[in-house]
Amino acid sequence: MSILYITSWNDSIYHSSGKGFLSSFASAGLSDDLLITYNGPLLKEYKSKYIVDLNKNKWLADWSKKFQMYIPARYGGVHRPKLNHNLQKFPYQLHKDALFFRDQCKRWMYKVAALREAMVYEYDYFIYCDADIIFKKPITSQEIKDKFGDADVIYHQGSHRIARCQGIESGYIIFNMNLGGRIFLEKLFELYESGEFLNFLRWDDGFVLWETKNKMPQLKYKDIVKPHELKVGGHVVCNGEMADYVEHMKGRHIKEGIV
């Protein structure tokens, strides 16, 4: 049984978090394969079995061109993007957050493209990790199977994120590629390719992952967030069943002004 870890970053995020990601991956004793996707210069410090330049990703380039009217100019779109598209059908109190996540959509599309790049590889599990994940100890494929059984997608969300209309926490998510993980990801890509994502409240990967789940009820899902007190920012990995294995330094990049 095998695991492929997947991550994505640019130069700024690498220097903020990626160094710690790679260092902890090694020091925690993980021996699984890693796919690093990047947007920016290739640095010699990127040590991984698979390294992919997303600047050369045709799928992402085609998507960006097709939906450029919904992308701000600073991310390669237009000066007056249509961020209000279909927003009026949602409660007014949700508009402010929705506009922020719509504005930032292109940034998170690199994560979606990273997952799509991984689809050519054969592994039992894909684990997508944000660059601000710190590894504490390894987990084996057998441990994942023992802990989570035949779940197709193992994720963090929890009751508080649901109540606040926040999506799935995409900073650490497991896909069972021997079961329904593959068709789940194919549906995720389809929602972005078709433009159906434009009908959702938010367009970021975490929210569209949630919408993908809602559209694929036939699959088995495992939300591994335990009951916890409400915290600002939707930080939930620390309250999940993988907290002994990883720490999510959520919010670091915003605090450092990288995003």
Image (spheres, rainbow, N blue to C red):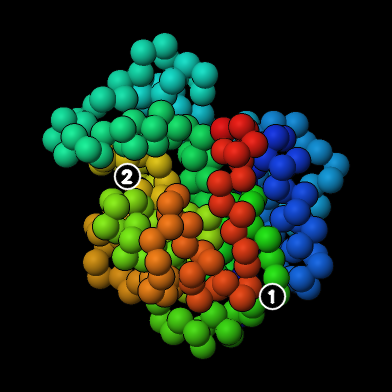
Question: Of the residues shown, which amino acid type is indicated by label 2?
Answer: Leu
Return the residue at label 2.
191
Q: Is residue 44 left or right of residue 25?
A: right
Q: Who is closer to the viewer here, 57 or 158?
A: 158
Image quadrant in which you'd find residue 81: top left
Instruction: Say which element carries label 1.
Output: loop
In this view, the residue farthest toward the right is: 44
Which quadrant is the C terminus positioned in? top right
Query: Residue 13 placed where, x, y %?
Result: 67, 40
Residue at the spot 81% in from the left edge and 38% down from the top edge: 43
Residue at the spot 39% in from the left edge and 57% down from the top edge: 168
Return the residue at label 1.
138
Looking at marks 1 and 2 on the same chain, the residue that comes earlier in the sequence is marked by 1
Query: Residue 173 placed where, x, y %?
Result: 50, 62
Which quadrant is the N terminus positioned in? bottom right
Asked if residue 63 is positioned above or below residue 32 in the image, the reply reads above
The answer to whether mark 1 and mark 2 are in CB contact below 8 A is no
Query: Residue 46 placed where, x, y %?
Result: 79, 47
